[in-house]
């Protein structure tokens, strides 16, 4: 009896001393032996490979050597062509999910897996994944907004058909486009409220942080500094040192400079005469102003210019001070595009491109991007174009604008 008791205590001691970490057991029907499996940490850019193995008998196992301090958002990458050195010829599959210190099971037929690259139709529903409590919580959030997200996507597709595609050919179905935008904004507000509720209810979870970061990145200048700060300050001390929390802080810092209610920032630019000027010389006090960041080499920017011309000619000339700010580094390219596009409103350029004030001061990482300023020079909205911009301008100017 004493021997059995001693063995029991010894077994318990060994079990307690075992390091608990993640184990991912995968079953990939149709996968050939030798196909490479990698686990990438998406908390970094570029992504960091945590572990790798090969498939044998359509199965693989990945096991962490150390316990995770916090769950990580990762991407499982299946490389069907490991010997291929040309990146354009590689055949890669991928699926993203949360990895925690648990036993996770992954299963998907190789040809049914989502691609590593963009796909017009998602294949994520083909994947069966179980065993991660953190992923289960994220699935819970996704389920809570699934119908709203689908409704938003349907409205976006309708908007592309009714407004965007005709606008490319100079046909502006403004009234119909604005109606769709208003419907979609109402759905977006429901998603925002559901997301904020989830964040408030998950203060001690990295999933709450992940969702908060996604929300802040998606919302463009429609949150005040205090509202952004409230999201960041929501989380408990237990998750303050996580990588995802660092990412959330970085996103918030980037958003503060163009948050709703913040006054525009003065930067040095170049005018069409080649002279150095200040943005403040062109922002008119007492009226609404629009800053449009663009570039001659940017296809979507050039695609939006016909709409800007339409807006300018529909009342913007007298009631909305429009200022386009190019980030072209080649002076000739900028001036040629201005002439080709018949851009009659104010034209300025940050000839330092993404190394200039547009990037460092306004944190504009992609164009086109616009900011609408109120008569006091404070930001009221940003990141809108097409009929979205029409809705904002109409709400601000009313009958002064004839769209």
Image: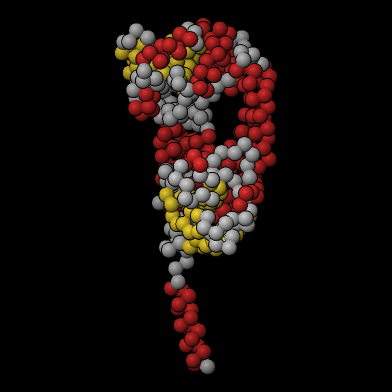
| Quarter of the C terminus within the rendering | top right
In the depicted view, which residue is nearer to us: 334 or 377? 334
Taking the image as shown, residue 84 lies to the left or right of residue 310, namely left
* Residue farthest left in this picture: 276
The answer to whether residue 207 of the structure is visible from this angle is no
Residue 88 shown left or right of residue 145 in the figure: left
Q: Which x, y percent locates residue 392?
A: 57, 20
Q: Relative to the observer, which residue lies in front, 131 or 115?
A: 115
Residue at image location 47% in from the left, 22% down from the top: 298
Tell me if 168 is positioned left or right of 297 in this view.
right
Q: How many marks?
A: 0
Q: Is residue 339 visible?
A: yes
**Left or right: residue 73 compared with residue 329:** right
| Rendered position, 10 above or below 118 | below
> Residue at point 64% right, 48% down?
112
Q: Is 207 drawn above or below residue 119 in the view shown?
A: below
- Name which residue lies at 48% across and 59% down: 53
Residue 182 location, quadrant: top right
In this view of the protein, which residue sits in the foreground, 70 or 366? 366
Q: How does the figure colour the protein chain or chains?
A: secondary structure
Name the residue at the bottom extreme: 1
Viewer-closest of 184 and 35? 35
Residue visible at 61% across and 13% down? 170
Quarter of image, res 364? top left
Q: How far across and down, in percent of the image, does residue 352 sit?
A: 34, 22
Q: Position of residue 43 (x, y in %)?
A: 44, 47
């Amino acid at each position: 009896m004493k021997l059995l008791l001693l063995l029991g205590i010894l077994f318990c001691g060994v079990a307690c001393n075992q390091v608990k970490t993640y184990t991912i057991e995968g079953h990939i029907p149709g996968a050939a032996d030798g196909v490479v499996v990698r686990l990438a940490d998406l908390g970094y850019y570029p992504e960091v490979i945590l572990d790798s193995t090969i498939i044998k008998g359509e199965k693989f196992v990945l096991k962490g050597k150390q316990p995770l301090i916090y769950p990580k958002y990762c991407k499982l990458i299946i490389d069907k062509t490991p010997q291929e050195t040309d990146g354009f010829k590689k055949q890669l599959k991928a699926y993203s999910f949360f990895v925690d210190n648990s036993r996770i099971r992954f299963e998907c037929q190789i040809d049914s897996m989502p691609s590593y690259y963009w796909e017009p139709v998602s294949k994520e529903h083909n994947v069966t994944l179980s065993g991660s409590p953190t992923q289960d919580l994220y699935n819970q959030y996704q389920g809570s907004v699934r119908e709203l997200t689908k409704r938003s996507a349907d409205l976006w597709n309708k908007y592309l058909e009714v407004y965007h595609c005709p606008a490319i050919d100079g046909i502006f179905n403004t009234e119909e486009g604005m109606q769709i935008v208003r419907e979609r904004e109402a759905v977006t507000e429901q998603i925002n409220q559901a997301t904020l509720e989830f964040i408030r209810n998950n203060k001690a979870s990295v999933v709450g942080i992940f969702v908060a970061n996604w929300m802040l990145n998606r919302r463009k200048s429609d949150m005040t500094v205090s509202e952004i700060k409230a999201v960041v300050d929501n989380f408990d001390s237990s998750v303050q040192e996580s990588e995802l929390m660092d990412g959330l802080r970085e996103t918030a810092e980037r958003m503060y400079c163009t948050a709703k209610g913040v006054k525009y920032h003065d930067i040095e630019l170049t005018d069409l005469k080649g002279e150095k000027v200040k943005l403040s010389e062109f922002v008119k006090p007492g009226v609404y102003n629009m800053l449009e960041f663009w570039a001659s080499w940017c296809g979507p920017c050039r695609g939006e210019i016909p709409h800007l011309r339409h807006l300018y000619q529909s009342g913007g000339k007298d009631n909305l001070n429009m200022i386009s700010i190019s980030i072209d580094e080649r002076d000739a390219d900028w001036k040629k595009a201005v002439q080709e596009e018949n851009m009659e409103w104010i034209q300025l350029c940050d000839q330092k491109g993404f190394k200039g004030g547009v990037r460092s001061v306004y944190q504009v990482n992609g164009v086109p991007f616009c900011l609408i300023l109120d008569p006091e020079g404070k930001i009221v909205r940003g990141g809108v174009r097409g009929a979205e911009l029409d809705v904002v301008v109409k709400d601000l100017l009313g009958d002064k604008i004839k769209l």
